[in-house]
Amino acid sequence: MEQNLQKLFKQAAYHPESRLSGDVWTAIEVKKAQITKRKKFGYLSLSVLSLSGSVFSIKSLIGELIRLGFFDYFSLAFSDSGVIATYWKEYTLSLADSLPVASLALSFFLLFVLFISIRRASYQFKNKLSIA
Amino acid sequence: MENSDELKIKEYLLGNEEVFKELVYKYTPSIFNFSARFVGVDYANDIVQDVFIKVWKNIKKFDYNKASFKTWIFTIARNTVTDYLRKKKMINFSALDKEEESFADNIEDDVVLPDEALIKLEDKEFLNKLLDEIPTNYKEVLVLYYQEDMTFKEIGELLGKPLNTVKSHHHRALTILREMLK
């Protein structure tokens, strides 16, 4: 009986139009293109934002480095290496003390975001080319 | 154990897009038939499209250690159909669960459909009409078991129900079918 029922049920199955599989595949392709476009736009926006942020933060970093005398300490290493060799501990501490840690961290973070977003955006561009 | 579907998914995840297309072509008729049983032929196309987009979006989450691809895709189809029925405020699949749990303990002998009944069922239109009248919970077991060649175990995994409950759904469905044919 089970086999008969199986046969009868299969005979009564609803069948889709032959183009349905093709339509489904097209819908997936369209969805894929939409997602790629959205991601591309998102990563490009992020790249622009992080680039402008990086410019500002690097400018502020340089200003801070000048204000705290980092470059003066740094140039000492080339002009008077004998003193540096003698007082290297004090010199290292002064050099570290003249580093604007917050500005430095912010600049590195923004540069990192810029790098990642450019990488992701270029991946999306490549992806779009491969879809096309 | 991996079957050809699982191997295809692995290949797709490695970058071969064509194999996903093969899966779409392979499962479209089954998902269409399953969906059409519950939402009607007119809306089944949309359901099929939704199902495959969900499958494509979530393919990385598929774990062949938990279930076969067939069970997984039918689970997605069932959830999509349930969402659709819920939106349309039509009956949902779990409406009869409670009643069925108590019935699960009382399965008697196998239901036998007499030959005359089977002859009546040879009329496709008639069989489809009967199926439309069978409650959703029982109908889905019949469709998955007889049309999609799934085992009771696979159906249980798909529906998230114990094996005994699935068997009792099957038993009850055949009983209803036999009553209808009298």
Image (cartoon, coloured by chain):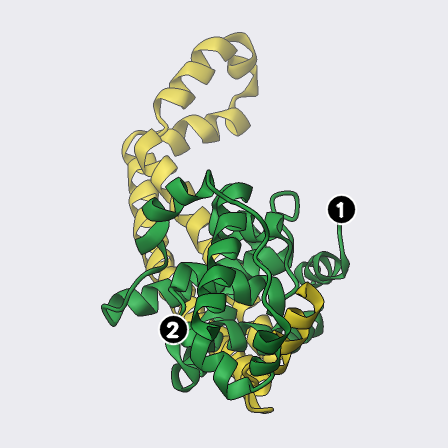
Chain colours: A yellow, B green
The amino acid type, in three-letter code, at marker 1 is Met
The answer to whether residue A120 of the structure is visible from this angle is no
Q: Is residue A72 left or right of residue B174?
A: left
Look at the numbered disc 1 and give the secondary structure of its residue.
loop
Residue A35: x percent and y percent? 44, 70
Checking the image for residue B1, the label placed there is: 1
Vertical relation: A74 (above or below) B146: above
Vertical arrangement, residue B32 with respect to residue B173, above or below: below
Residue named by callout 2: B133
Image vertical order of residue B126 relative to residue A59, above or below = below
Q: Position of residue B148 (x, y in %)?
A: 62, 67
Q: Residue at x 40, y 81 (%)?
A: B40
Q: Can residue B52 be seen in this view?
A: yes
Task: Tell me if mark 1 has few (under 14), some (14-19) or many (20+) residues whose alpha carbon lies within 10 angstroms of its own.
Answer: few
In terms of depth relative to the viewer, which is nearer, A42 or B154?
B154
- Closer to the observer: label 2 or label 1? 2
Mark 2 is on which residue type?
Glu
Identify the residue at horizontal 45%, vertical 16% (top origin).
A91
* Mark closer to the chain start, 2 or 1: 1
Spatial CA span between label 2 and label 1: 38 Å
- Disc 1: host chain: B
Residue B160 vs residue A83, the one in the foreground: B160
Name the mark on residue B181: none
Give the class, few, some or many, for how many residues have Cα within 10 Å of label 2's Cα (few <14, many ≥20).
Answer: few
Compare residues B168 and A45 and report the one nearer the observer: B168
Locate residue A8, reporting x and y percent: 63, 77
Of B150 and B77, which appears nearest the observer?
Answer: B150
Q: Mark 2 lies on which chain?
A: B
Rendered image quadrant of residue B60: bottom right
In this rendering, position of residue A50 left or right of residue B108? left
B77 sits to left or right of A55: right
